[in-house]
Amino acid sequence: MEKMTAFSQLRELMKENRSYRRFDQSKKIGEDVLKSLVELTRYCPSGRNLQPLKYRIVDDADECARLFPVLKWAGYFADWDGPEEGERPVAYLVQCLDTELTTNLLCDDGLQLEALTLGASSLGIHGTIIKSFDVVKTKEILKLPEIFKPLYILALGYPAEKVVLEDTDGRKDADIKYRRDENGVHIVPKRPLEELLLPQTL
């Protein structure tokens, strides 16, 4: 029973762990909290146990402001340039590959990003994982040494929007694009379990 309770709690946390793109910019995240999130990545599996990922914390307001313009925000919102002033992230975690350790990190990046976002969600902090950004300008802004290659940027803050899940109709060609309704609620379609399971007998 205790194990099932833990599973149910994890399931609910997974459902809460969505991409948020609008935040309450007046509510800051302490550096100690950000370090605690990065500390979670120590417990993630790592290919060959190399542990080649490092993180640059960005929580200074001026540095956040300079980083914001080099980010691309939502591929399905082609006419949206990202959150307005007052709804922007208050912190970023820049995931970097230490190229002196390896140039092939296997799946470490995704495992650690999930740990970071789950940890943040458990604290009421949410964010979005950004892959589309100007790597050269990011390195210049953050004065990153050459050996560190930025892979992803996790934008973080306390949410200023509502995100809900919606089951698709089960068709392979179902519309899976996230959208906002007339009230600004962010809708995220998810394929049903039945579509994820392959038949055991072919």
Image (tube, helix red, strand yellow):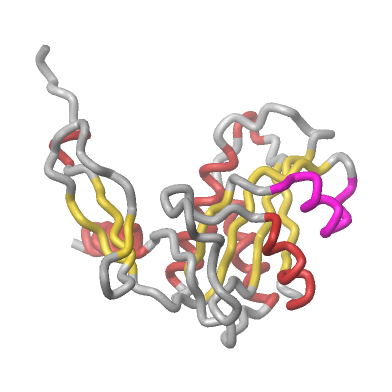
Where residue 167 appears, as percent x and y from the top left, is 17, 51
Q: Is residue 157 above or below residue 80?
A: below
- Left or right of 93, for residue 173: left
Residues rendered magenta in the picture: 134-145
Kindly report the secondary structure that dominates the magenta region of the rendered protein.
helix
Where residue 105 appears, as percent x and y from the top left, is 65, 32
The answer to whether residue 61 is visible is yes
The answer to whether residue 6 is visible is no
Residue at the image point whose x is 21% and y is 56% from the top: 166
Image quadrant holding the N terminus, namely bottom left
- Left or right of 5, for residue 186: right
Residue at the image point whose x is 72% and y is 70% from the top: 64
Residue at the image point whose x is 65% and y is 64% from the top: 92
- The verdict on residue 136 being magenta is yes
Image quadrant in which you'd find residue 31: bottom right
Image quadrant in which you'd find residue 70: bottom right
Toward the front, the furthest residue is: 79
Image quadrant in which you'd find residue 153: bottom right
Instruction: Depth check: give the residue in front, 101 or 90.
Output: 90
- Left or right of 163, for residue 125: right
Where residue 60 appears, as percent x and y from the top left, is 76, 75
Where residue 72 appears, as percent x and y from the top left, is 59, 53
Image quadrant holding the C terminus, namely top left
Residue at the image point whose x is 44% and y is 54% from the top: 77
Q: Is residue 95 above or below residue 4?
A: above
Toward the bottom, the furthest residue is: 26
